[in-house]
């Protein structure tokens, strides 16, 4: 577009035009899509030149200048941070480069352009991280900020309004900078009007700031003066590493030795690109990567690479900031097991450390503890593999090590300064693999050509096999009991058209995400703790509703409790009132990515005690997350041990797995489980009254003994429990003696609850109208099932009852006349308000 045409289309120019403008570009990167904000492209559009390299990450703060429509414009491009990373988790090198940027446009910048891609998410954790990053400049920085929405296509004004409606935290950011924003199409360099309009907005902001620029923090200038001394140390470090490659220990032969068969074990924290690195080494996509590709168990793969036969073992990762005690037992067993999967043992342990993350104290502690699983001597066989190599840009890994500080320096000392950098985006660069193999050759020679042999005496694979076998038995038991229970109670079952659910759980376990999964919509704000995301917690009970396959489902999300003390108890208790008249189910959410300790059990018990012992009859455990991938949850349960198994038993062996992938079949199976539980609870929902108050209806045995309805139901439940335990007794026996199947093994027909298909209908009382308890009791007493019920007290007394009037206060024994009147039922029991007629056996 010509200069003349531009002038015709320009808006009115301010009389207080700034002749020299100094601009700093800041912004983040989207972790999930790894998408940049478009800072470098924005700088090029403003300057009208290709001053900044596009398509490659800006690793240092870079300055460029140009004359733009009669002004001298200076633009400084800065490294981007992950939007969801706090300052604590941003690499120190990146932080220092961002803070150094004002020194490149002295005496100071007029404007900070906060570059945010149009139509991208901007959540609470993004805003909080942004505020942390900016507060290091100056408390007055918001006076100098304009939000610049970068667009890759023509836009409408409505686009910005829609974005603000969708993301309230973005509205908060705009308010802090007095609603200053501009939209720039970074794919249209010919449109110079959008640039001149931006410069005019900067003019207006400068005028509002009394024509001043931002005064930089003194500490930033001090840091800049230390640069020379730091660069000298970096040079020395690089020379030392090069010298280490040339010099060889005296016991190593001078001629080069290349291993033809190399065994490698990959270890590292989650999101460390461990599996991607394994794929790069093998030259093939053998290990799954991405959100759904979390390594849940050790995987072994082989390939011939550059004339060598390579065996690579991928292992489960750990949360980089979580101590060893938080890691699931199953994962710890798998990590220990990894060094036994490539006999006689691995030549090298490759410890992946992502460059994109600060290596702080908590990460160092977690890494040290998890590496301890492999034995004390593991460090002599370890090479640190720095991943996300593209993050380096034009910088070196030695610069990063120097700046990061004491914790990364400790890691270098532990592994004898053996390290290598991988850029998984450069699949065609074979030199990075060959150089790694050469470093492995050198390390093996230093270790006298020895494989790594762990120092533990017992192979963990034995323990792992026993745990997995136990999980298989438990899975069979739970499924068999579920089938039996469904058959026993099928006559009672009514499909629920209205289901009320309360979510319970600790902070950050995924309650809100579980609610979204159940309702098949994003009603609740995400609170799952992932990577370094700053989470907004649920502080008050919130109920959301939706139709799920024709069923009206109400879900109440509750505040999470702390593992150290139970907080928000009053608010959690209020959840029962919110879904009046009461919930059908409590869903107790437990994360699959953490271990379940004795302390966890105590905290859960404390929480559930708020509702009373009766609440357990209405509780289902929800295991949340993708941590297990395709592994059955029973493996996690078997490995976690007694504390979790006791809790599951307390809930009547009711548990279910949910993920945040919104898989409809998972939700339907859960709702079916809720229906089965409600059926077993005789159609009742939970209220605080029925949780602690005794039933008012009183029933009399023909023996003269008075029973409340609550006591009567308890006796029936006890008998059903006996049958369920007896039915799986053979599985326990078989697990102890696999070669000998028990003679009394359960293989018999489940008694029908219809009342006319039992083999024993000779009772003189109530024949043909037997309750579930009667049928179970007779089933247990039958000769072919007697072995299963051995040790249980199954008396053969059959009895009936009738409802007494509320004002009856006399003990009147039931006569034969009373019994004959009860032979034919007048009512069936569907609600607590109806009359009851049933027989019972104990």
Image: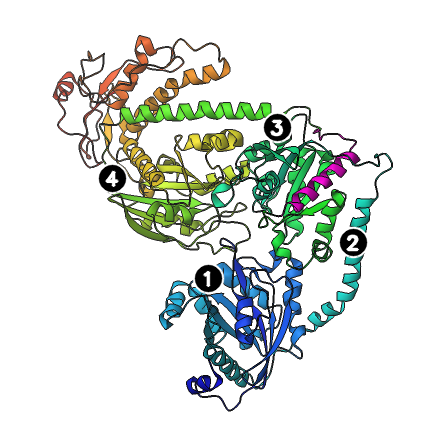
User: Which disc is residue 233 wearing?
Assistant: none
- Cα separation between marks 4 and 2: 70 Å
Q: Mark 1 or mark 4, which has the lower sequence index?
A: 1
Q: Mark 1 or mark 2, which has the lower sequence index?
A: 1
Element marked by disc 1: loop
| The stretch drawn in magenta includes residue 441 | yes
User: Which disc is residue 122 wearing?
Assistant: 1
Residue on which disc 3 sits: 341
Magenta stretch bounds: 429-454
- Cα separation between marks 4 and 3: 50 Å
- Cα separation between marks 1 and 4: 39 Å
Element marked by disc 2: helix
- Cα separation between marks 2 and 3: 36 Å
Instruction: Identify whether 229 is placed above or below 454.
Output: below
Q: Quadrant of residue 723?
A: top left
Q: Mark 4 or mark 3, which has the lower sequence index?
A: 3
Q: Which of pointers 1 and 3 indicates the residue nearer the eye?
A: 3
Q: Quadrant of residue 164?
A: bottom left
User: Which disc is residue 237 wearing?
Assistant: 2
Q: Residue at x 12, y 27 (%)?
A: 826
- Cα separation between marks 1 and 3: 44 Å
Q: Tell me residue 241's x, y (percent).
A: 78, 49
- Cα separation between marks 1 and 2: 41 Å
Instruction: Identify whether 756 is placed above or below 806.
Output: above
Q: Which of pointers 4 and 3 indicates the residue nearer the eye?
A: 3
Q: Tell me residue 304's x, y (percent).
A: 62, 33
Q: Mark 4 or mark 2, which has the lower sequence index?
A: 2
């Amino acid at each position: 577009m010509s200069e003349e045409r531009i002038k015709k289309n320009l808006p009115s120019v301010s009389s207080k035009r700034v002749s020299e403008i100094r601009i700093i570009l800041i912004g983040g990167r989207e972790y999930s899509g790894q998408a940049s904000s478009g800072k470098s492209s924005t700088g090029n559009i403003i300057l009208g030149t290709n001053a900044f390299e596009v398509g490659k990450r800006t690793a240092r703060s870079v300055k460029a200048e140009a004359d733009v429509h009669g002004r001298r414009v200076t633009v400084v491009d800065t490294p981007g941070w992950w939007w969801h990373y706090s300052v604590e988790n941003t690499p120190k090198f990146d932080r220092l480069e961002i803070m150094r940027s004002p020194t490149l446009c002295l005496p100071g910048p007029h404007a900070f352009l906060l570059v945010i891609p149009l139509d991208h998410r901007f959540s609470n954790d993004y805003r909080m991280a942004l505020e942390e990053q900016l507060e290091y400049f100056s408390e007055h920085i918001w006076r100098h900020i304009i939000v610049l929405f970068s667009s890759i296509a023509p836009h409408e004004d409505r686009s910005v309004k829609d974005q603000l409606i969708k993301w309230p935290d973005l509205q908060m950011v705009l308010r802090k900078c007095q609603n200053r924003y501009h939209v720039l199409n970074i794919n249209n360099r010919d449109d110079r009007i959008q640039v001149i309009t931006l410069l005019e907005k900067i003019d207006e902001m400068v005028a509002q700031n009394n024509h001043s620029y931002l005064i930089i923090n003194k500490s930033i200038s001090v840091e800049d003066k230390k640069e020379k001394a730091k660069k000298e140390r970096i040079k020395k470090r690089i020379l030392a590493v090069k010298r280490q490659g040339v010099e060889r220990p005296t016991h190593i032969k001078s001629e080069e030795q290349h291993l033809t068969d190399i065994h490698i074990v990959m270890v590292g924290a989650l999101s460390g690109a461990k599996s991607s690195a394994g794929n790069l080494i093998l030259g093939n996509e053998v290990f799954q990567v991405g959100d759904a590709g979390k390594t849940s168990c050790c995987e072994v793969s082989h390939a011939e690479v550059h004339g060598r036969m390579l065996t690579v073992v991928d292992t489960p990762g750990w949360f980089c900031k979580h101590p060893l005690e938080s890691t699931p037992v199953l994962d710890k067993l798998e990590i220990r097991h990894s060094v036994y999967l490539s006999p006689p043992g691995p030549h090298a342990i490759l410890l992946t450390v992502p460059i994109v993350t600060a290596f702080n104290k908590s990460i160092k502690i977690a890494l040290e503890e998890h590496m301890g699983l492999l034995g004390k001597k593991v460090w002599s066989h370890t090479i640190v593999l720095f991943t996300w190599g593209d993050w380096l840009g034009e910088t070196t890994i030695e610069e990063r090590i120097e700046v990061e500080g004491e914790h990364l320096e400790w890691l270098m000392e532990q592994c004898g300064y053996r390290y290598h950098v991988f850029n998984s985006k450069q699949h065609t660069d074979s030199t990075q693999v060959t150089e790694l193999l050469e470093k492995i050759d050198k390390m093996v020679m230093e270790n006298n050509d020895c494989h790594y042999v762990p120092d533990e005496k017992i192979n963990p694979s034995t323990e792992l096999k026993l745990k997995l076998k136990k999980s298989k038995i438990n899975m069979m038991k739970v499924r068999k009991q579920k089938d039996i229970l469904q058959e026993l109670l099928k006559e009672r079952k009514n499909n629920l058209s209205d289901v009320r659910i309360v979510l319970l759980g600790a902070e950050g376990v995924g309650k809100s995400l579980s609610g979204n999964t159940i309702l098949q919509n994003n009603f609740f704000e995400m609170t799952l703790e992932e990577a370094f995301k700053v989470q907004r917690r649920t502080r008050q009970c919130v109920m959301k509703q939706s139709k799920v396959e024709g069923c009206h489902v109400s879900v109440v999300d509750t505040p999470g409790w702390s593992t150290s003390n139970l907080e928000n108890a009053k608010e959690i208790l209020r959840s029962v009132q919110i879904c009046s008249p009461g919930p059908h189910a409590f869903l107790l959410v437990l994360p699959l990515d953490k271990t379940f300790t004795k302390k966890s059990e105590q905290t859960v018990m404390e929480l559930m005690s708020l509702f009373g012992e009766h609440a357990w009859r209405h509780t289902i455990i929800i295991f949340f997350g993708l941590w297990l991938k395709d592994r059955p949850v029973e493996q996690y349960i078997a490995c976690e041990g007694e504390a979790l198994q006791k809790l599951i038993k307390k809930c009547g062996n009711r548990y279910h797995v949910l993920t945040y992938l919104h898989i409809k079949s998972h939700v339907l199976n859960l709702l079916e489980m809720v229906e089965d539980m409600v059926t077993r609870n005789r159609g009742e929902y939970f209220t605080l009254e029925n949780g602690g108050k005794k039933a008012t209806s009183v029933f009399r045995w023909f023996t003269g003994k008075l029973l409340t309805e609550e006591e009567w139901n308890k006796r029936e439940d006890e008998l059903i429990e006996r049958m369920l335990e007896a039915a799986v007794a053979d599985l326990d026996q078989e697990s102890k003696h696999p070669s000998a199947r028990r003679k009394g093994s359960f293989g018999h027909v489940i008694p029908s609850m219809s009342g006319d298909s039992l083999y024993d209908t000779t009772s003189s009382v109530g024949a043909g109208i037997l309750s579930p308890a009667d049928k179970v009791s007779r089933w247990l007493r039958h000769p072919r099932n007697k072995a299963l019920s051995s040790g249980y007290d199954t008396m053969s007394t059959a009895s009936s009852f009738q409802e007494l009037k509320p004002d009856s206060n006399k003990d009147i024994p039931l006569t034969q006349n009373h019994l004959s009147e009860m032979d034919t039922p007048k009512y069936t029991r569907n609600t607590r308000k109806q009359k009851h007629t049933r027989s019972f056996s104990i």
